[in-house]
Amino acid sequence: MLILKSLTVQPMHGYAIVQHIARLSNGVFAVDHGSLYPALARLQTNGWVIGKWGESPTKRRARYYTITASGRRRLGEKGVRVRSRARRDRRRDVGQLERNVALLAALRYRLRALLRPEAFARELKEEIEFHLSLETMQTEQAAADDMTRGDARYAARRRFGNVTHYAEETRAMSGLDSLIWRVRTFGSRCERFAMRLDFTAVAGLTIALGLGATTAIFSVVNALILQPLPYPDADRIVAVWMDNRKLGVREDIHSYPNLADLKSQNQVLSHLAPYNSPGFNLDWNRRAATRRWWCVAR
């Protein structure tokens, strides 16, 4: 709030804000020089402050900060009380326009930090160097001839704090670190998805091969074993073999006398009929093939 209060006087650069807060509080509030810039970055991302480059009294380039209408509203300043409804509506329209301008300024700041990070870092470094140079000059003037410029520069850096730390904190406040984290997270998720995609492809191919082999095996088993024969009452048809103990042959073929004995002594089967499956060779267009058929006598 002290930063916004200082900017209500006039646009100021970072070092001037620090000096103004010290004078405004009669030295009660000692602003940490380095922490000022992350705070300014947060104010800019919220649209409460706009930073523009200009020329300082020392003829050096400096970034001047200006409070926006949204910043004044955040600070709690109130305008003149308007009695007329027309004036009140006109003032409301002006306030909406100011909020839109502040929103566009905040969006521009974020996009610049996100799309041009190198330029953002270079300008931040230039701004901090300008701050340190003014603090060095102030320290030299206060010490008169008792301090060299090198010592004054060292004292200014100590008062500012860790430059790298505050630069990283300023970048984080601008939203750049959040974007980098999200990009890295998205990249790691894409990498994991690609690894899972390879595994999914291999697993899918294995499942497809397994399903194909299972279908083929089932088709063969169904045709040979499960599917009934193309005869009426096919489940009641049986084959009667002979056990030739003299020759030690199981499931031997029958002779016609045996068939006659089986027919005369049958008390289980409804009918007995001999069958044979002779084979023959076919030759056509110089292609030979063996064919077999079944012959059943009634």
Image (cartoon, helix red, strand yellow):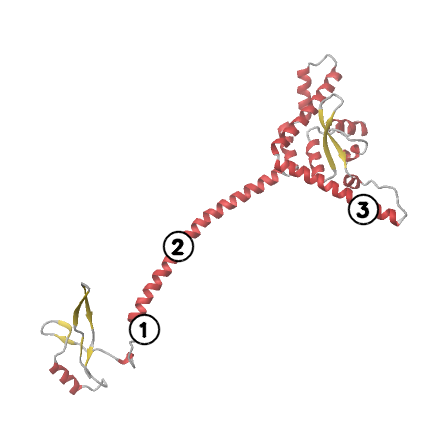
Q: Amino acid at mark 1?
A: Gln
| Tag nearer the camera, 1 or 3 | 3
**Are dots 3 and 2 in contact, CB under 8 Å?**
no
Q: Sequence-wise, which precedes: disc 3 or disc 2?
A: 3
Secondary structure of residue under mark 2: helix
Q: Which residue is mark 2?
A: 205
> Residue at position x 74%, y 16% from top?
143
Note whether 37 is above or below 262 in the view shown. Answer: above
Secondary structure of residue under mark 1: loop
User: In the rendering, at what x and y percent does residue 197 appear?
Assistant: 46, 50
Label 3 Cα neighbours within 10 Å, binned few <14 / some 14-19 / many ≥20: few
User: In the rendering, at what x and y percent does residue 147 appear?
Assistant: 70, 14
Q: Which residue is mark 3?
A: 93
Q: Which residue is mark 1?
A: 227
- Mark identifier at residue 71: none
Note whether 218 is above or below 150 in the view shown. Answer: below
Note whether 262 is above or below 83 in the view shown. Answer: below
Q: Sequence-wise, which precedes: disc 1 or disc 3?
A: 3
Q: Is 268 or 295 nearer to us in this picture? A: 295
Q: Is 154 or 130 nearer to us in this picture? A: 130
Q: Amino acid at mark 3?
A: Asp
Which quarter shows the N terminus?
top right
**Are dots 1 and 3 in contact, CB under 8 Å?**
no
Place residue 235 in its image quadrant: bottom left
Q: Is 54 or 221 nearer to us in this picture? A: 54
> Residue at position x 71%, y 26% from top?
62
Place residue 282 in its image quadrant: bottom left
User: In the rendering, at what x and y percent does residue 177 appear?
Assistant: 61, 38
Whole-number angstrom distance, CA of label 1 to CA of label 3: 85 Å
